[in-house]
Image (cartoon, rainbow, N blue to C red):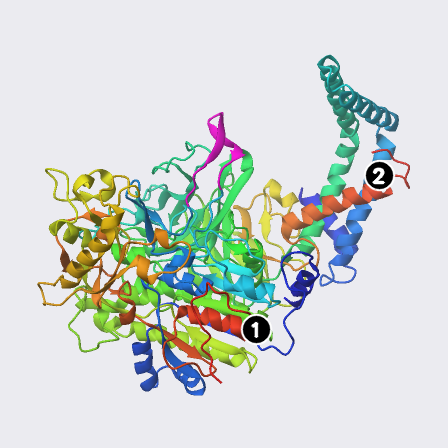
Amino acid sequence: MRRVLFLAALTVGAGCSDDRVSPDQPGVFVLGVDGMDPVILRRMIAEGKTPHLAALAQTGSFEELGTSNPPQSPVAWSNFVTGMDPGGHGIYDFLHRDPKSYLPISSATAEVTDPGTFVQVGGYYLPVIAGDDILNNRTGIPWWDVLYSAGVDVEVYRIPGNYPVPSSDAKTLAGMGTVDMRGGYGVYTWYTDKAPVATAGHDLKADVQLVTVEDFDLDGIGDTVKGTLKGPPDLFHLVPGALPGESDYLTASVTVAIDADAPVALIKVGDAQAVVAEGEWTPWMPVTFDALPAGTMALGGTVRFYAKELRPGFKLYASPVNLAADAPPQAISTPDDFATELADVLEGPYYTQGMPEETNALKDGTFDDDDYLGQVGLVQEDSSAMLDVALARFARGDATFFYLSDIDLQCHMLWRHGDPKHPGEAAHPAFEASSAEKHALDIESFYRHVDGLVGRVRARLPADTLLLVMSDHGFQPYTRQVHLNTWLRNHDWLTMKDGKSTGMLALGDVDWSRTRAYALGFNAVYFNVTGREGEGIVATEELAALRTKLSAELLRFTDPKNGRKPILRVDSGRDIYHGMRVDEAPDLVVGYDHDYGHSDESTLGEVGELELEDNTSRWSGNHLMAPEVVPGVLLSSRPVRTSGNDLTDVTATLYAWYGQTLSSDLRGQPFLTP
Amino acid sequence: MALFNQLTTALFDVLLAPLGHGRPWFDLALWPVLGGIAALLVIKAVSNQGGITRAKGLIQVHLLEVVLFRDDLRTVFPATAKALGYNLRYLAYNVVPMLVMIVPMTTILVQLVSHYAYAPLRVGDSVTMIVELDDTVGGVTPAEVTLDLPDGVVLEAPPVRTADGTIAWRLSTTKAGDHVLRVRAGASVEDKLLSVGGPARKVSVLRTKGWEALLYPSESVPVAGSPIASLSILNRRDAPLGPFPVGESGILAWFFGASLLAGFLLKDRFGVVL
């Protein structure tokens, strides 16, 4: 790393300072633990269950860390990355909306207006003039660029919200938000001889392939299964700008040969083969997809299979095809070859998919808790090995960030087995008596795992390194789903077309000429503003009064089941955000109380029958609430302010640690105290 | 094929790795240069050097014509056609030396790959071994194929016997050494070497009756009457080669690239027109 810095220092006119970081400057190591909750951690420390975190708290500090508003991971991590709030970095929610069409769109990528020019040759659409690049929607300068320019050797592992990867001279690997080969956030394949049954009100998030176990050797025992594995969209055959249909993906063949006597199979995908016994996972298997003939454009991915059942039924899981770490077909790191460098050091592939835990299969019911935890164990091994690499590369003076997903997704999925934050509370609506006892302490086990990693980090860092363990938010139970668009309809803010009582915002079901407000995203409400929305009717001058009126009504909203108020706070986007992109902010940001959250349906713009219902999904813990009910944690190896710290203060502290001036658009202040 | 493999392997086992397999740079630097020199000598001996000189000159003349008279299409088109024609003639002059060189150059490359492409597996690594039956021989079903494991190798999962005559074992290594995996198929016995741990050395990944044996000559070809067509180890580790590109494709690219470079650098010294 030092050599790279030396070379960088020789670079003229790259905007870098000529002065590299002083050899006397201690470094910083930031462990970002998504979803670590201060209440749970405080209890576990008191019970002696997390000795390394306890030691860090005792010798340094342990405080709550204020999260973003709304407390969603892409928003929160963008606050940390830029030191600004959403008004500055422009990430307001997992989902934004196209105001003209009322369609939900990903907040991760900037709008592409020019797809380029193509010619059609022999059935292929070939680009002749490049269109817009797909760029990250986040604006603002990431802290790693500031520190790198100041001569600090920076490495950033699996930072959320950094895909598409913005250019940088620092070494960064994209995390949450990085797509799989299909271009989504993780679609698995389920090969089965019986159609799986989706849980009520839930669509399977899988590519389900109904297969037949054929008897090729005619011995009366089924022995061979053939299927396909979908890779990236077949872009050269797809009409430019069109969304891929089910058959518009490149595929690789999958063959499973099952032994006649033992529950074991030989899986072949492309040129790779692996032997797997029932209940086992294969190692990563390379697979390539030919976008053009004769291997002139072979796109590399990796996949793992899980033999859930080989006989008498057949159930085989294939992970989302991850971009090949050793030769990713698109950039997932800066520089481009940092991802490859890590694959070389790790001597093999690693998860490149942003959220690798297979929550979809558990939600779908194709995985049970044991299957899920087995897969999470693979993610942990992967992450743990990469942490060792990060530690081995860390030298005095360096700044390294390392992201851990251990706690967040497990709290989302396993909270239903036993509330680790409110142990005396009634059972979760998604409580499963058959598995609860076995898994009641799973969430604690993930805290313990992180504790072990913190111990490893503390033991290996130079003694004077500033170690920060931080989370982007905490956690709460999610027992009641709020269908906010239904509430808006029932309270005359949103009107359906004649003859309809339910439907989707973007599918022509809403009478926009009589609709003043709608909800899209997990915490956002928009007014149907004239000139901004496609069929807006609310005049700009009416907005202030309508904001006040709707906020008051939302705060009066009462859950008939228990008399509680689901919504704790409602903020005006214009009032709480600062920066150049405030105009893009939601008009209102809804902050739910614990136990409550937006339903998936309402998030995507559905107007249903019910305003509220029990959450029976396995997605049973949540944090998409009011920021004050889900603060994160801050542990530091040095004393910090005892109150008022938030995510942007971490950024400011990194700048201050290396003597950098805080620019006026940064929201935070350094929190280290003498 | 078996005899050719035996002879070349015996020869290159003597010639290669004079400094040991842990110092691959010596052979990886030397043999491409020797290959380049050999190619120059062959070209000088068997090619039409005069024809090559004339073809090159005429290509240059017609390209110059294209550049000078680029506004006159009546000149540009015939000149371009002539340049292409002489290009073809130039390539034709190189066919004979290429045919002469293809066997020795490929042999050197295959031997370099055999010696340096792979590292022994690590103790504890999972290994998949695949045996394919020869359907032209027959007489043995997959159920009759068994594997004798030496000390240092254990079975991780029961074998898979497929309907198309493949038997696959997933093994784990517990000790370093060059282990012999003995496969019994009816009355036939074939061995496969599995290198684990220890110093850098030749690592064999495939024994086969097929044409691929020419590319993997380290172990003998299964006998003609054997019901076993091939024995392969799927798990392979690229050997570290310092500054040289690793793996089969890395050595291939390096060997041809460095041979070409050596040839161009030395062509004047050898009085060869390329």
Circles 1 and 2 on the same chain: no
From this view, report whether residue A213 is shown above or below residue B59.
Answer: below
Q: Is residue B80 left or right of residue B38?
A: left
The residue beneath circle 2 is B40
The residue beneath circle 1 is A659
Which amino acid type is shown beneath numbered disc 1?
A: Gly
> Is any part of residue B159 visible from this angle?
no
Q: Which element carries disc 1, helix, strand or loop?
A: loop
Q: Residue A114 in magenta?
A: yes
Q: Is residue A380 left or right of residue B192?
A: left
Q: Position of residue A626 (x, y in %)?
A: 26, 66
> Is any part of residue A234 visible from this angle?
yes
Crowding at dot 1, Cα within 10 Å, few <14 / some 14-19 / many 20+, comes out as: few
Depth check: B157 or B68 in front? B68
From this view, report whether residue A319 is shown above or below residue A452.
Answer: above
Please state which of the two labelled residues, at mark 1 or mark 2, is closer to the viewer: 1
Q: Residue A418 in magenta?
A: no
- Magenta residues (range): A111-132
Q: Residue at x 37, y 55 (%)?
A: A582
Task: Report which quarter residue A170 is drawn in.
Answer: bottom right
Give the residue at the far top of this rendering: B74
From this view, report whether residue A337 is shown above or below residue A496.
Answer: below
Depth check: B158 or B42 in front? B42
Depth check: A246 or A4 in front? A4
Spatial CA distance of label 1 from label 2 is 62 Å
Q: Position of residue A10 (x, y in %)?
A: 71, 61
Q: The N terminus of chain A is located in which quarter?
A: bottom right
- Mark drawn on residue B81: none
Which amino acid type is shown beneath numbered disc 2?
A: Leu
